[in-house]
Amino acid sequence: MKIRSRTAAVLSAGAALTLLVTACSGESTATTGGPAGDPQRGGTLTMAFNTDAQSVDPVTCAIGIGLGPCQAIYGALLYYDLDADEITPGMAESFSSEDGKVWTLKLRPGMTFTDGTPFDTEAVAFNWNRILDPALLSPSMAAAKSITWNVVDDTTLTVTSNEVNHQLPFLLSEPLAFVASPTAISGKGADFGNSPVGAGPFVLSSWARGTEMVLDRNSGYWDQPRPYADRLVVKTIPADDLRFNALQAGELDVAVVVSEKYAKRAEAAGMTVVQSQQLGGNGIRLSSRGTLADPDVRTAIGKLVDGDQIMAAAFPDDPKATHFMPEDSPLYDANATWPDKDIAGAQTLIDGYRARNGGDEVTLSYITTAGSPNLNRVAEVLQSQLQQVNGLKLEIKPLDGAGFATALVSGNYDLILNSLGGAHPDNLYKVFHTNGSGNSAGYSNPAVDEALNLTHTSDDPAVVNQAFKTAIQEIIDTTAYRFWRPSETTLMSPASVHGVQPAYQYWFRPELAWKQQ
């Protein structure tokens, strides 16, 4: 059985301005359809992906693979529901505004962290202030800097955006979503990341980095009887075929894959396949620093990348990305496509750059994640494509999950394997606005900034959608980001597992999933 979540669309003004509790505690919100009876408690859920989380400290985990385990440990203040295309309550029961500038955050009353510390607005303020510590190099710092906050009472926090921002709830679903125990942070110091304390559905029991993370059920979680599973095990298995084999052998309950052929095999075997379209696609983000600050070099790379060739070598059974967004997306634009391959034109641009800069060979690095055969092939083909012109060399640098995340957050790359990180369109602001919280490339484009500013200040969905389209076209024209494969999360599970609901890019909501015993 295959289930698809809809492509991302822009929130309506009403959805963005007022968030209300939509389900009572204990009511199933599983989107996979057709569970055999009511959810059952007990058992172990084991899932696997190709790389490990870089961190489970809320200051540094709100990017990439780290988002998932942090959600399990801390819960999230708010969630982005891909199916409903709206921000929904989490640890917070509402987040509302009359004008898009001054917001009121209401927490659920009576929540506590697993060490007994109250989960209150002082805890939220403590965590957000910690993000601002420059010594911690938090990827969420720009998001925290975009707002100020004031504790009103134990469950009420006033949040004031520096500018009108009707997309502000998105920040509380990712970069500012996770709240840890202030008592534990203060007491554990630098060791907090090894033994975190949250109030989410699960508690970290052990973590063999690069291999396996084990989390046990939080019996004090606010949303009883969730989580349904007694234990959550997260395995790192780099290759898609090995993950699929483990799923078939009954060693996994949920497998995340990046190749469509395994989704087809799982469906043919009677498994449940849940797929959700993300924003943009899988490809490369280009730095705007150093050599790549020169637009001619970026344009040359755009002329050399052959997405069809990369797909044929690494993902021959998967659909190719012909446009920035698929045709069923409200952000689709028939003109938002990639430049034609032009080796001669690229050579002219590289020759001109070298002539202006002393004649030395241009050497760039490409950061990718280690261990995946598919991604190794992508790197090798990309290298051969860029080196079709004289005077341009590409060095491949595979890194483990932690090293990759560090490179991405710090901006220490020329080209880096990348997607936009999720389905919500405000990821475009996060990654490409000059002040975006995820803009590690140093990209700065006044036309993009103007368009993305409008996506925050306007509460008219038609105006916002057009502004996103304007930004997308400029991002393509300046070769800030290039991809060859649509970004789609595929979650596969046997028929005995129910309630697998996508969250973030390569994760699901583990507190909603359950197994027939």
Image (tube, grey):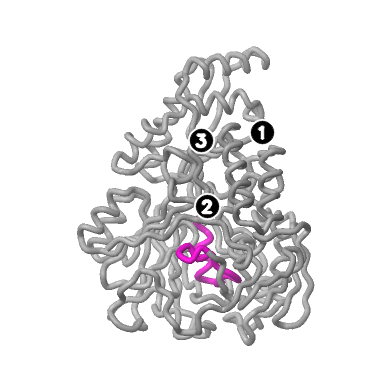
Q: Earlier in the sequence, mark 2 or mark 3?
A: 3
The region drawn magenta spans: 64-85
For label 2, the residue is: 421
| Labels 1, 2: front one | 2
Mark 1 Cα shell of 10 Å, populated few (<14), some (14-19), many (≥20): some
Image side of residue 200 versus residue 341, left or right: right
For label 3, the residue is: 335
For label 1, the residue is: 289
Whether residue 192 appears in this view of the structure is no
Image side of residue 241 versus residue 206, left or right: left
Mark 2 Cα shell of 10 Å, populated few (<14), some (14-19), many (≥20): many
Identify residue type, mark 2.
Gly
Q: Nearer the viewer, residue 374 or 505?
A: 505
| Residue 253 belongs to magenta span | no
| Labels 2, 3: front one | 3
Image x and y of residue 485, in percent:
41, 42
Q: Nearer the viewer, residue 459 or 360?
A: 459
Query: How far is mark 3 from mark 1, CA to CA?
Result: 28 Å
Identify residue type, mark 3.
Asn
Q: Nearer the viewer, residue 247 or 14?
A: 14
Q: Earlier in the sequence, mark 1 or mark 2?
A: 1
Secondary structure of the residue carrying tag 1 is loop
